[in-house]
Structures are given as C-alpha cells and as structure tokens.
Image (cartoon, rainbow, N blue to C red):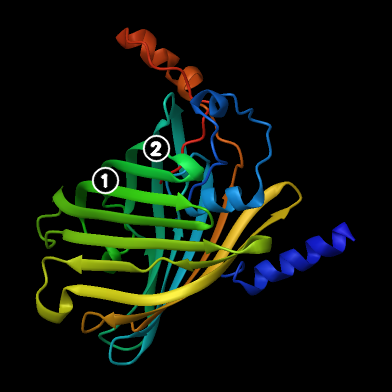
Amino acid sequence: MRRRSSVKTLALALLLGLPLAGSALAQANKEAAGEDASDEHQEGEVDNDLEQAQRAENPVSDIVRLPIINSTFFGIGPRDQVGNALFFAPIVPFLFQGDWSIVTRTIIPIITRPDVATGSGRTTGLGDITLEALGHKLWRFRRGQLFDVALGPIVGFPSATREVLRSGKWKLGPKLIAGVTAKRWVALLLVRNLWSVGGDANRPDVNALLLQYLLFYNFQKGWYLAMEPIITADWMQSGTNRWTVPFGIGVGKFFRIGRLPITTRAQAFYNAVRPDFGAKWELRISLIFFKPNPLRFAKEYFRPLVAAVGVELPRAAGARSPVA
C-alpha cells in the first residue's frame, strides 16, 4: 500500500509539471512556547507537513533549498513566438542566536530567446548570474504568527554566453523582503532595484525594478494555492515599454518521496501591461528540493574568521528562522 501511494504521489507531481521543471521562491514554525524552548529544537526532529510546506514557500526561511523554476513565455512579438527561461536558484541560510540569519541565494538562468526581428530561429545560452546575501530577522508573536524582514545587496555578473542575451554590465542594488506567516497563510512582498555599475561601455545602462508579491494558502493533504506574479519596470524605457504587470494564480502540492520532502507548483499569468514586443502569457513550473531541518553554520564555518579578526560571534541558533 505504501509503495502504491508513493507511485500515485509521483504521478501527481509529473502532472503538475515536474518534467518541465527540470526547472527560485514561507516559512513557518510551530507555535513557540518561548525563545528558550525553540532553541532546544533538535536537528532530528520531524516537523508536520503544513510547517514544512510553509517554510518551503518562504524564500528566506531557515532551510537549505534547491528551487528549479521553468518559465515559458507565449505570444512574444507580432508573430506570437515562444521563449523560455530555466532558473537554478540554490538558497543557503547561515543561522545565529536571537532569530537572526544571513540568507544567500544564487540565481543561474538558462535563456531561450526567439528572433523577433526575423520571426524564425532562437538563441539559447547562459544569462547573467545574480548573487544576493540578505540579513534577516524573525519576530514571533502570540498564536504562532511570524513576521520576517530581510535586507541586503544583490550583485549581477555579466556572465551571458550569447550576444543577444548579454547586458554586458555589472549590476548592483538593494533587495528587501517582508513577510507574515499566520495559520495557513504565507504572505510576502519582495522589492529590488538594480543599476549598472560598470562593464561594456557600448551597452545601454541598466536601471530596473522588480516587485513581487507572494501569497500562499495551504489546504489539507499538502495542496496549496499560489500567487507569485513578478512586476517589472525598466526605468531606461518610457511609455508602454516601461512596465510589465501580470495577473495570475496557480496550484501546488507538498509531498515526500521516501524521506525526501519536495514541493512543486504550476502557475499561469497574463501580462495585462507589457512592452510592445513583450510576452502575452507565462506558464511557470517550480520544483523545490529542501532539507527539512536547518543547518547551523556559525560555530563550524566562522571559527577561522573569528580567530582572524579577534571578534566573538554569537553562538549558532537552535531556533528556526524563516525568509529568502
């Protein structure tokens, strides 16, 4: 019976788009009885599925994750062409005492872009890689509500391998995430802006905003609704070419294969506002592998730094602290 159930779960994941997801971005903790009690949480303790699902949904939670996200864009340009972007976005948090942490994320895109000018052919290659490191603080409230704030720099590298995919610029800017987890809800707001700070002088400068709201509602048996539209503004453009504003919703499922927890979701978005040659629709498939219990790096990995600078770091926290 257990094997038959696992086969059904895997088949369900495939229907939600696991293959396309060869394709990030909640948090949640059990209601804390107090700071000391949460500090005593043991690494081997198994949390319930609702908590695990919420922690996987929060991009700045305290768990190590490998999100794989595939976005397919439809209706590009006057000939309604198709493009694609595949993202690998490993997330590694570093935890400290008092529900403080540093959350790192590297975003590696592989982009397929159609030739809009000729209407035929396409180019595939590595896009610009970005790296972010966010300082994060978690506040715990009564009845299990959690509030997260994360702030830090994001750096973009001119790593694209094909000419039409290149920005040719080094980019730098701030990123802010604020989120709330309560009962079955996870809600977050993500804002970042990148400016070019060097690179190819023959390439246009970069000044780009990304605004994303993330809203999840978790049902029984691992199912959940998801809304993660990405609003963008290219400040170097004007008029209708500046903004992209999508609307959409999707469905997801948290499950386990053996002891391995996985969450996957499929979402569709319509770009109600878009540039002249922008895509009309986006289908986004996400697959996230994660480690259920947080890693605690502070003592083991920062000891050489502590010895070098002569400053004592706070001990690594046992408490779980969610945001990415």
Q: Give the amino acid at mark 1.
A: Val
Give the alpha-carbon distance from disc 1 to disc 2, as whole Å. Answer: 27 Å
The residue that appears at 52% across and 27% down in the rendered structure is: 296
* Residue at the disc numbered 1: 155
Secondary structure at numbered mark 2: strand
* Residue at the disc numbered 2: 139
Q: Is residue 81 left or right of residue 95?
A: left
Q: What percent of the width, then of the height, locates residue 152?
A: 27, 40
The residue that appears at 64% across and 27% down in the rendered structure is: 42
Q: Is residue 166 left or right of residue 12?
A: left
Above or below 272: residue 155: above
The answer to which of 229 and 83 lies nearer the viewer is 229
Asked whether residue 283 appears in the rendered view, the answer is no
Above or below 170: residue 31: above
Above or below 189: residue 153: above
The answer to which of 111 and 304 lies nearer the viewer is 304
Q: Is residue 312 left or right of residue 158?
A: right
Q: Give the amino acid at mark 2.
A: Trp
The residue that appears at 61% across and 66% down in the rendered structure is: 18
Quadrant of residue 304 in the image? Answer: top left
